Image: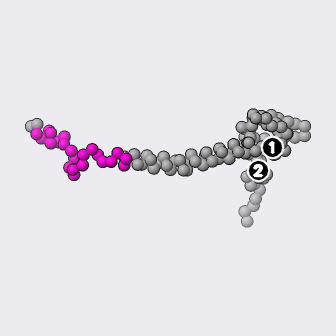
Amino acid sequence: MNIASIAFAMGPPPGGESGGGNPIMAFLPLIIIFAIFYFLMIKPQQKRAKEHRNFLDSLRRGDEVMTAGGIIGRISGLTEQVVTLEVADNVKIKVARSQISGKPPGKGGEKTGQSKG
């Protein structure tokens, strides 16, 4: 084997291209996958988080709410961090404001008990 044949074997690929093509085309699939994840997962999550923050900011005394643990009660007191819920006559509990998940089902929250027909 002579040196000329080794040098020829290490040359650019046939077809005249050297360098492997456009580097943007190599990252295009990753960019497309990120865009899909953003619009299908990240953006809706941010929208739900914003709606929940607005809901927590709009809480007032007398509103009926449900906690993340499933406890339903009427708000009898509010501070920046704590919500006092009346869950029965003269039975009050204090819950962290961030643990209020929403309105109870059937009270402007999820629809339950509807028949299909």
Magenta-colored span: 4-25
Whether residue 1 is visible, yes or no, is: no
Position of residue 87 measured from the top left corner of the image (x, y, whole percent)? 84, 40
Q: Is residue 94 above or below residue 31?
A: above
Position of residue 5 measured from the top left corner of the image (x, y, whole percent)? 12, 41
Position of residue 76 measured from the top left corner of the image (x, y, whole percent)? 85, 39
104 or 15: which is nearer to us?
Answer: 15
For label 2, the residue is 105
For label 1, the residue is 60
Q: What residue do we see at 40% from left, 48% from top? A: 28
> Residue 28, which numbered label?
none
Q: What residue do we see at 9% from left, 37% from top? A: 2
- Residue 17 falls within the magenta-colored stretch: yes
Q: Quadrant of residue 65?
A: top right
Whether residue 36 is visible, yes or no, is: yes
- Residue 2 falls within the magenta-colored stretch: no
Callout 1 crowding tier (Cα within 10 Å): few <14, some 14–19, many ≥20: some
Position of residue 55 measured from the top left corner of the image (x, y, whole percent)? 73, 45
100 or 21: which is nearer to us?
Answer: 21
User: Which residue ends up furthest to the bottom in the rendered image?
Assistant: 117
Amino acid type for the residue under numbered disc 2: Pro
Q: What residue do we see at 21% from left, 44% from top? A: 12
Q: Label 1, label 2: how many angstroms apart (C-alpha)?
A: 18 Å
Amino acid type for the residue under numbered disc 1: Arg
Callout 2 crowding tier (Cα within 10 Å): few <14, some 14–19, many ≥20: some
Judged from the image, the secondary structure of the residue bearing numbered disc 2 is loop
Left or right? Give the position of 94 relative to 42: right
